[in-house]
Amino acid sequence: MSVPATVQTQEFDVERIRADFPILHQQVHGKDLVFLDNAASSQRPQSVIDAVSHYYMHDHANVHRGVHTLSERATAAYEGTREKIRSYINAASTAEIIFVRGTTEAINLVAQSYGRERFQPGDEILITWMEHHANIVPWQMVCEKTGAKLVVAPITQDGELDMDAFTKLLTDKTKIVAVGHISNAIGSVNPIKEIIDLAHKHDVPVLIDGAQSMPHTQVDMQALDADFFAFSSHKMFGPTGVGVLYGKQALLDSMPPYQGGGDMILAVDFEKTLYNELPAKFEAGTPNIAGVVGLGATIDYLNQLDFNAVAQHEQALLDYAQEQLATVPGLRIIGTAKDKASVVSFVLDTVHAHDLGTIVDSEGVAIRTGHHCAMPVMDFFKVPATARASFAFYNRHDEVDVLVAALIKAQRMFA
Ligand code: 7TS
């Protein structure tokens, strides 16, 4: 992602960072692991693993229920993470932080709870051509129930959102805009502040899919003025099975519960149920307590990083990767937006993406191959699949060299 030129950063010590991630120090097929599948799921530092383990060894009980000591400890750790997240993304209140399973559940929650009640036949939901299926299918489902229409803003040949077209498609019929911050398939960074300001001029709320931005950058909800923002812990170095829906309090207050059950009620009888206040209203049933505790430790870990140094390191990795990959004969990079995160999709003219994935794995290199749950983007670039190398702050330049050597080996095998 672009780095402000004037910002002074500390020297980024990648070896010190790598020492925090035990999983990186292993061999696969007799070769040092080179983990370049971070966009699918990144790895966890020891402190996060320890926090989850400590929680299970000392503090586990159900939350918000018992007056006994363990339940109070578990509740304090669970609610403590809510405050850490609030502060990390600068939300106005902890009532605006809803724990969910991940980005997918967060978007489904908004589509069903916000959309299903309000959308009418003829209303429009505006997304973009580069969305992950998690930001397409929930809206299609709500369209089927309400008669609303999914409108898709086009992208350019470089894989950038076509802002002129987007501006024209945003009309009085638009009832919500739902846009990814960073494309998982091609790495493009969308101008979300501009999109939010534009939509707000039409009084249209905006949901940002932040699944791919949280591992690379810090976001400020009040400065951004997003109405909803969704992200997954497992992509930002935290446990799997937990994520966050941020929503402005007034909007969340106006929405009905998404699921019913324990914890989301104040009183129940067979005639009528009185729903709980935010955020409990949207957290039915026993949550992923250990995951949330681990996410709290993840925020502590991220808070001690210098994100300007992280951004510079990742930009240097991206530049180096794109430069080196361009030296591989017959390799084409898919997605050449000016502002890109450290995600590089590519195809080789002689080797299918799936074969590539298997061959580079035999060299210890983990990349993802396929459509990346973004089939419309693949259709746009007229490719069935791509190979994707996605970097995190713990990756090194020499890992790019290992990838490139593995690709050349694959090419020789298929020659
Ligand atoms: N949105 C984006 C932009 C994503 O990249 C993903 C997952 C999701 C939503 C869904 O997140 P989840 O945590 O709820 O599953 N992306 C990928 C990927 O690129 N490879 O595997 C999953």
Image (cartoon, helix red, strand yellow):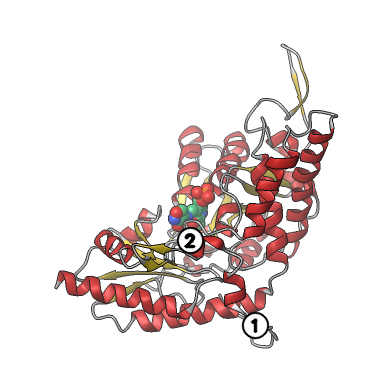
In the image, 341 versus 355, the foreground residue is: 355
Farthest residue toward the front? 30
On-image quarter of the N terminus: bottom right
Residue 361 can be seen in this image: yes
Does label 2 or label 1 sit earlier along the sequence? 1
| Spot occupied by residue 284 in the image (x, y as percentages of width and height) | 67, 31
Question: Which is more foreground, mark 2 or mark 1?
Answer: 2
Q: As drawn, is 7 to the left or to the right of 384?
A: right
Label 2 is placed on what type of residue?
A: Ala
Q: Which amino acid lies under the numbered mark 1 shown in the image of this protein? A: Pro
Q: Quadrant of the C terminus?
A: bottom left
> Residue 365: x and y, percent?
37, 66
Q: Which residue is mark 1?
A: 4
In the displayed structure image, the side of residue 398 where residue 247 appears, left or right: right
Residue drawn at (48%, 61%) of the image: 39
Which mark identifies residue 233? Answer: none
Give whichever of 154, 394 is nearer the camera. Answer: 394
Q: How many marks?
A: 2
Q: Position of residue 115 (x, y in %)?
A: 58, 40
Real-space Cα distance between discs 2 and 1? 24 Å
Give the percent coordinates (x, y) of residue 412. Answer: 18, 75
User: SS class of the residue under badge 1?
Assistant: loop
Relative horizontal placement of residue 63, taking residue 198 as reference (left or right):
right
Residue 313, quarter of the rendered image: bottom right
Is the CB of mark 2 within 8 Å of ligand 1? yes
Residue sitting at x 73%, y 49%: 248
Q: Residue 39 got which mark?
A: 2
- Kindly give the residue lying farthest to the top in the view shown: 270
| SS at circle 2 | loop
Q: Identify the residue at horizontal 44%, vertical 66% (top origin).
A: 36
Q: Residues within 10 Å of mark 1 (few under 14, many from 20)?
A: few
